[in-house]
Structure formats: structure tokens, C-alpha cells
Image: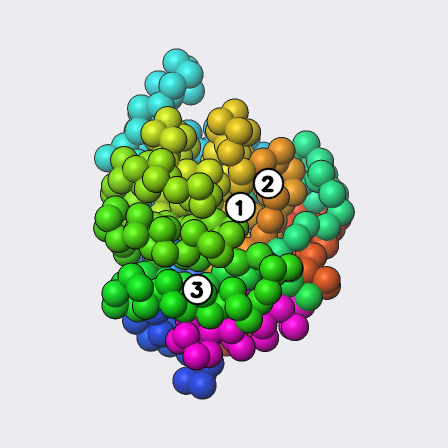
Amino acid sequence: MKIKRVDADWLHVPIPEAQQHVSDFGRIASFDCTLVRIETECGLVGYGEAKAVVGSAGNNHALTELIRVELAALLVGEDPRDINRLADVIYNGSRAHYALAHGHVFPTLGRRGMLISAMSGIDIALWDILGKSLNAPVWRLLGGRRAARMPAYASGGWADAGGIGKQLMGYVEKGGFKSVKMRVGVIDGEVHNSAKRVHAACAALGPDIGLACDAHGTYTVADAKRFCRLVADCNLMWFEEPVTGDDKRGCAEVRAATDIPISAGESEFNRFDFRELCELKAVDILQPDLAICGGITEAMRIAALASAYNLRLAPHLWTGATAFAAGMHVAAASPAGFILEYSLGANPLLQELAQEGFPVKDGMVEIPDRPGLGITIDQKFVERYRVKVS
């Protein structure tokens, strides 16, 4: 089995104005990703997903061209089943032969950032091919799923104090969710405004619906500590990205000052970044984004770190259907996986890119046993939203 062709398309999906939300990232007017397509000489096709930014909207021109032009040349003619080897080829560049021979990395200058995002999309597509070639779901290849269904939490929550309760309860009613997540942070101005919104949400949800808060890394250490004190009576599931990813020691300081579980990782790129979070005791929950962190291969290494440090794994799944499926397989197979993020913002890439969809019933998502990622890409959707980049 050999790789015949590697291609990538920037999918730019406009969001109707009435469905747009505003956060610290600004008004979200589109959802973007790079869809990777790898075809083998025997006709198998695998799909993956890469992102240029961790949020919804972003310019994926450079990322898409990196995959189509530079990385495709490294992969054509290779066996797609040699996933670990190909990850080393991409990560180590011209020194890959040293890495393969000596058993440790010799990374290129692009050992973080866009190269790792590109690697993510390629890696996911390779696992999709491997699963299809063996007529097995990816979770089976990762050691098996721990349950046929996993709980999911509804992710959104941008309304003000007067509307946040109604907004979050609307999520609960849509899929029977038992837990939800809302955004806080700089978008609220002063810390006490965020706390006011959180208390309003708690009052509406009651004690039986879990609530998590996400600051998108926008607080200082002092403000994050103050927020934790102000919402100490709300029994939060976790406080996500309290400070910037550039201040891991600061994150550890926040964690040491509160008994609210701290989560982070959506802005980190590979196991080395997550190792630092673990060593600094900065988090309780690791949240790799599989379209950014290096794909399924790297996510399983990150999951092993979570298990070794007695932490939990909750992948960042504010993504399209391809990366969502990849994260779902990893979470289902990992001993540390315990919950799935489910976007309740307008997200056509999650809801329409794959024909099968990911229905939520009683707050649970089924872990499908279809081969590969278990999704069928809607080619009409791809044609409609493909951006011509060259």
C-alpha cells in the first residue's frame, strides 16, 4: 500500500449573522479548517483536519499550501500505515534518518506552530486509512473503547447576566446535556462582572447540571485567583485556560490557590508542551485539540501523560467533524478520557461536513464502530465551501 496523492482544501463556511456570537476573539462570522485528503494507490481515501487558529474563524491559506506543496512531497510513495515513522519524517525534516536510527527527536525549527497543525491533519487522515484498510474503527486500533457511549457537555455561553441562564438551559433542553460550559474573562470587563454571570448561570441550572467556565487565557494570575474566590460557592466542574499558555507557571499558581479543577491545553502543540503542564502541576485536566496538537498519534502520547500524572483528558473539540471524530476516538480509548466537548455555537463544519453527524441523546454521544474515523465526508459541502488558494 502506497500513498498516491496528498491534498488539502481550505473550507471557509460563513455563519449567518443571526447565528453569530461575539467573544474576546471578536465577532465570529465564519468557521474555517483545512481538510486533508490522502489517497492510496489501491483506492483507499483518508481524511484529516488541521487548523490555523484554535478558535472558529481563521485564514488557512498558508497552512493549506504547506500541506499540499511541502509535506505532500515527503509522503507520496510512502506506506500510509507507517504512521509513527511518517510523524518522525515530518517533525524532524532532513534529520529524520537520525531520529529513526537513534530513537530520539532531531526537530526542525518548525517544531511548534503551523508545522504541527499540518502534521495533525495528515496524521488523522493516516489513521482513517489504517482503520479502513483493516475494516476497524480507530478506537479499536488504539486498544478498544472503554464504553459504547460517552458523556458530552454543551459548549457555548456568551450571553450577559440577564440572558446566560436561559441560553445555557436551552443547551440542556436540546440534547439532555448534564453539563455545560460558558465563556468568561476579558470580554466581561471587570472580574466581578464574570462572577455575576456565573452566579446567574448557577441559579438557572440548579445543582444537577454541571458548569464549567472558560477564560480563553485572558486573565492575569491575580484576576484568575480573584475570579476563583468570587465563584468558590458555585462548585464548578473546571476553570479552563485561566491565563495565557505562555505563563504555565502562572497557571500552576492559580491551581495552587483554588480547589476548582484547572484545565488547559487547546493552545499547546505536542507532548513536550503537555509534559511541562504536568511537571509544573499546572492543571487537573489536559485538553489537546487534535487539529493542532499533532493528531491522533500525539494525542495518545498526551493521554498517556494524563494517565501517568493521574490527570484527566477532555479533548478540545471546537472543531469540524473530522477532528471531532478523531478526538472522540482518543477519548474513548484513553484511560484518562471522561467527557466530550460539543459545540453549541453555529458550527456547520461539525453538523454538515459528515453525512452521519454526532447525535446527542440524554447527554451522551455514541462511539460508532464504523471503519476508520467512522464518518463519510459530504463532497457537495466541500465543493460549496472550498477556497481556491492557488
Instruction: Identify the image quadrant of the N terminus.
Output: top right
Residue visible at 59% across and 75% down in the picture: 170
- From the image, tell me which residue sits under label 3: 198
Report whether residue 258 is seen.
Answer: yes
On screen, residue 382 above or below 238: below
Q: Along the polypeptide, which appears first: circle 3 or circle 1? A: 3
Q: Along the polypeptide, which appears first: circle 2 or circle 1? A: 1
In the image, 227 versus 168, the foreground residue is: 227
Q: Position of residue 254 (x, y in %)?
A: 33, 42
In the image, 274 versus 376, the foreground residue is: 274
Query: Image check: 178 left or right of 17?
Result: right
Residue visible at 43% across and 64% down in the picture: 198
Q: Along the polypeptide, which appears first: circle 3 or circle 2? A: 3
In the image, 294 versus 206, the foreground residue is: 206
Whether the residues at callouts 2 and 1 have beta carbons within 8 Å, the answer is: yes
Hey, which quadrant is residue 119 in on the image? top left
In magenta stretch: residue 178 = no
Hey, which quadrant is residue 34 in on the image? bottom left
Q: Secondary structure at mark 1?
A: loop
Query: Image check: 262 left or right of 383?
Result: left
- From the image, tell me which residue sits under label 1: 314
Amino acid under disc 3? Val
- From the image, tell me which residue sits under label 2: 337
Q: Position of residue 224 (x, y in %)?
A: 30, 51
In the image, 157 versus 140, the foreground residue is: 157
Tell me where the magenta segment starts and ends, as one range. Answer: 154-175
Mark 2–mark 1 distance (CA, rounded to whole Å): 6 Å
Q: Secondary structure at mark 2?
A: loop
